Amino acid sequence: MERKRKIRSPNGEMIDAVELGFRAEGEEPWMSYLLDDGTLLRVKLALTNIFRMEGQQDPLGRPVYMFESTNVMSISVPEEDI
């Protein structure tokens, strides 16, 4: 079920939006970074909400979407540093 809300756009304007349900297709990828101290840092973006902006279109006439997200992080420290 769609839920209508007002959300703040990047320019600060309050815009009517529809909150959409969603599901991830496939596995959400992790980005891995090896730090100079040997630590392996893994990060991925996890979407929490997706909105379709009411009455808004991009220059090609497509609907405009915004999302809210959180970062998920995993850290593996080298054994000698534990």
Image: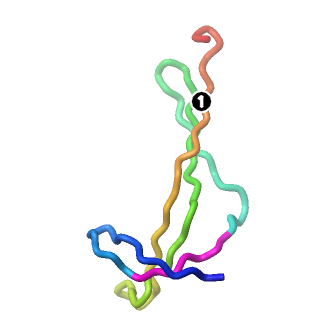
Q: How many labels does the image show?
A: 1
Q: Is residue 57 magenta?
A: no
Residue 26 visible: yes
Q: Is residue 51 left or right of residue 57?
A: right
In this rendering, is residue 62 above or below 66?
below
Q: From the viewer's perspective, is 43 left or right of 54?
A: right
The answer, for residue 31, to whether it is visible in the render is no
Q: Viewed as shown, does residue 50 lie left or right of 79? A: left
Residue, disc 1: 75
SS at badge 1: strand
Which quarter of the rendering shows the N terminus? bottom right
Q: Give the range drawn in magenta.
A: 16-22
x, y percentage for residue 16? 41, 82
> Residue 5 appears at what percent x and percent y?
47, 78
Quarter of the image where one finds residue 13: bottom left
**Residue located 47% across and 76% down the image:** 65
Quadrant housing the C terminus = top right
| Residue 76 figure quarter | top right
On the image, the x and y values in percent for residue 73 come to: 57, 39
Q: In which quarter of the image is residue 55?
A: bottom left
Q: Label 1 amino acid? A: Ile
